[in-house]
Amino acid sequence: MKACLLKETNERVAILADPNFDCLATGTTAGLLICGDPALAIADKDLNTQVLALIAKLGDDEAQGAFSDYARWTRTRDRKCKLADKDNVPLAELAPFEGCLAGELARKTTEIAAAKGDPKKVFGRAQSSPLPDADAVDLCVAQIHAANACGNFLRVSRIIQIDTEVSERDALVTAEVEMKVLSPFAVCSPIASTCTGTCWDVGSGQARPTPRSRESLPISHRLRIEKSFAFHKADGGNWQCTTKALQPIELGVALSGP
């Protein structure tokens, strides 16, 4: 028992001492849980190492898409583990969700191992979704962002499903999409319009036209938009997004801070 405790402690210290590892930087509930549990932290670090090794085999454009795929998987994982909307829940009350996180990390690690070093068996495959839900919206937003090179300026941090209307062949999913600014861009510009769906007023935090403003949205600003996304059921049974642009949106708010 003593040897096991010493081994766990040494592994945890090594993780925390690694300058490339900072799961708190994710700013998510799942990140806090992972940081607080040595076993989860080790599993997450091992998975990230394997993912980076796969992505390193791709060209620049494909690599950017692969990073987007992996980020989308982490958001899907958090939604599956019911952690996407638990920002203000005390960590002590989140212990029941640790098992789900551990299971998802293990499944993804197994998928990476089964690829046998071929990144194309892991990344760039999803073009449609089995259900018209938050995961489908996540893929839709990723496709819109990829088409407009938004990844240089914004990262989607989470997507929360609000409402769904489904018929036999068509569906409309209303969702809240939260994005974090990675690189400054003008509050009313082509980037703002195509990548966030609107112009912004930094002073009020509202989504509104400010055509003569010279302000820029600073790094780490969070933008939340509410939008309805349209889907059509293909012959194979999966749902394909037919919304090709984020503009217009139904609601938007800009928040400062991480």
Image (spheres, rainbow, N blue to C red):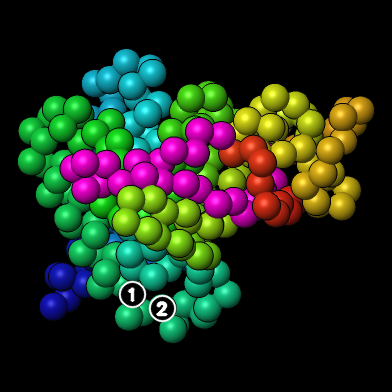
Residue at the (63%, 30%) spot, across then down: 194
- Categorize mark 1 by other alpha carbons within 10 Å: few (<14), some (14-19), many (20+): some
- Could you tell me the amino acid type at mark 2? Leu
Position of 116 relative to 190 (above/below): below
Mark 1 residue element? helix
Give whichever of 222, 40 is nearer the camera: 222
CB atoms of marks 2 and 1 within 8 Å: yes
Query: Mark 2 — residue?
Result: 94
Is residue 223 a member of the stretch shown in magenta?
yes
Res 97 label = 1
- Give the residue drawn at x 40%, y 26%: 64
Q: CA distance from mark 2 to mark 1?
A: 6 Å
Of residue 69 and residue 58, the one placed in the foreground of this image is 69
Give 235 or 174, whichever is nearer the viewer.
Answer: 235
Q: Position of residue 81 (x, y in %)?
A: 34, 68
Q: Outermost residue toward the right?
A: 212
The stretch of residues the image draws in magenta is 219-245
Say left or right for 131 vs 202: left
